[in-house]
Structure formats: C-alpha cells, structure tokens
Image (cartoon, grey):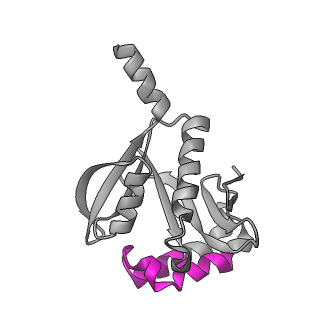
Amino acid sequence: MIFETERCNIKPICSDDKNDLFSMCDDADVWRYLGGSGTASLHRTNIENLEKHLPDPNRWTIRDKVNDTFIGYLSLGVHHDGDDTELSYLLLSKHWGNGYATEVAREIIRRVFQERKLGRLVAETQSANIISCKLLEKLGFCKLKELTRFNARQSLYAIDNPALRKLRRSNNG
C-alpha cells in the first residue's frame, strides 16, 4: 500500500531506507519511552536483516512530499496479546510537534478499516509518554487498561472500526 497525505508520502520500506531507519536508532529522544539504548540496538539489528522480510505490506517510511526528507516509520503488526493488530509509529524527534504523526496515523487508520475490514486497532505506549497518549486519544483511541511490560507502565488503547460500530447500532436498534 503506497499512499499520501497532505504533506507526506507513505511508502513500503525498501532496502534503500536502511540509513534513514538507522538515523532513528541514533536519536536518543526516540528511545526515551521505548526501553532506551538496548531497544535501539535491537532495532538496529532488525534493520540489518531488513532484506529478509521484504516486501512487507505492513511497514512504511514517512517522507516529506516536497523534498523526500525522512520523517519516520509506521507499521502494523500483531499485538502482544496475539489477537489484535497494533499500530506503531516512530518519528525522528526533530519532526515532533508538527502534526505528522496525527496526519499519517489518521490516514492509515482510515485505510486499514476500509481496505482490510479490521474490527479494531490497538496501540500501546508507555504511560509516561503523555504526548503519545494524547495523540492516540485525539485519533479516537480509547484507553483500555494499564499494564507493566518492558519494565515500564504501559497504556493500551483501542479504536473500533466506525463502519462496524454503525452496523452494530443498526442491528441493535
């Protein structure tokens, strides 16, 4: 799935993206709420093995439409519970606060619900990451619970497919 938003191009990850993805590993602010340098190191190893997993229809780079500057990474995957599909996003810290995460997440949510017909998406973030928690709520996610994972307090959020919500209401009405 290749798509765009007002300011961004979202393209499936390819081997040419390695250096841009490595730049996230070197951004300490990106890892502040993700387990620190050990997590960055593990991510670097995963990037090294990128070719083994391509093409991957569930991982994308986020790039500026005007100058093709790398902004970040977006993915869908199986959540730790094994049942739900999880939305994940990482942006280079120099791009925080510009609305990119809201813009691209809103579009991927819309497309996933329309094209893949998922019933819901989940997202998990450290509870201390107030900005990410607020972003998820702004996108329409509701907090389900808090739990401890990766030695930190996590908040688990979910958003239901609006088309299925309407269908349930009409069937119950």
Residue 150, horizontal then vertical, whole percent? 30, 69
Q: Which residue range is magenta in the image?
A: 18-44
Along the viewing direction, whichever of 102 and 117 lies nearer the viewer: 102
The residue at the point 60 percent across, 59 percent down is 59
The residue at the point 45 percent across, 21 percent down is 167
Q: Is residue 82 above or below residue 163?
A: below
Quadrant where the C terminus sits is top left
Residue 47, horizontal then vertical, whole percent? 60, 74
Residue 165, horizontal then vertical, whole percent? 41, 29
**Res. 95 image quadrant:** bottom right
Main SS of the magenta part reads helix
Q: In this view, does 139 lie to the left or right of 142?
A: right
Residue 44, horizontal then vertical, whole percent? 55, 79
Along the viewing direction, whichever of 14 and 10 lies nearer the viewer: 10
Q: Is residue 155 left or right of residue 32?
A: left
**Res. 103 image quadrant:** bottom right
Q: How many labels does the image show?
A: 0
The stretch drawn in magenta includes residue 129: no
